[in-house]
Image (cartoon, rainbow, N blue to C red):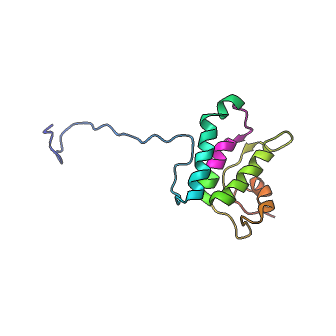
Amino acid sequence: MCGEPGCQGNDVQAVHRAYSGRNYTGPFRKTPGRLFGMAFIRLYQLTLSGFIGNSCRHIPTCSEYGYEAIARHGFWPGGWMTVFRVMRCGPGGTSGLDPVPVKLDATKHWWTPWRYWRLGSATSGTATK
């Protein structure tokens, strides 16, 4: 209870936890494309998402998925992953737990967007046989 730095008194210090919102908070490279894509999704979350309603069939929601996909994999790969995720979320689509893969395999390139369609069926990002 001496009040000086390094004092071993009986004071219980409050532990402050940083607010972790609903979006991805992990490390990522802050390139202009990623920041633009993440800002666009965040703008959608703050404005239009409330009017459309909370009706996503997946966990995490499509906007959270898009935010994390762009943060982890970049603007083009993450953007394609987001587009196909929203398409899978429609009528007759999939539902349930569909996390963003931590790492993409070597066949996924931004110029081959059709390869991102089946990404939601295998959670590791690679097809299993």
Q: In the image, is residue 48 above or below residue 67?
A: above
Query: Which percent across, then down, holds residue 65?
Result: 66, 47
Whether residue 85 appears in magenta in the rendering, the answer is no
**Left or right position of 33 against 116:** left
Whether residue 66 appears in magenta in the rendering, the answer is yes
Residue furthest toward the right?
92
Residue furthest toward the bottom?
106
- Quarter containing the N terminus: top left
Query: Which percent across, then down, holds residue 54?
Result: 69, 32
| Figure quadrant of residue 116 | bottom right
| Figure quadrant of residue 111 | bottom right
**Left or right position of 1 against 113:** left
Query: Which percent across, then down, holds residue 121?
Result: 78, 54
**Nearest to the observer: residue 51 or residue 17:** 51
Q: In the image, is residue 13 above or below residue 25?
A: above
Look at 53% across and 58% down and name the residue there: 28
Q: Which region of the structure is painted magenta?
A: 54-67
| Figure quadrant of residue 108 | bottom right
**Left or right position of 32 against 95:** left
Look at 14% across and 43% down and name the residue there: 4
Look at 53% across and 60% down and name the residue there: 29
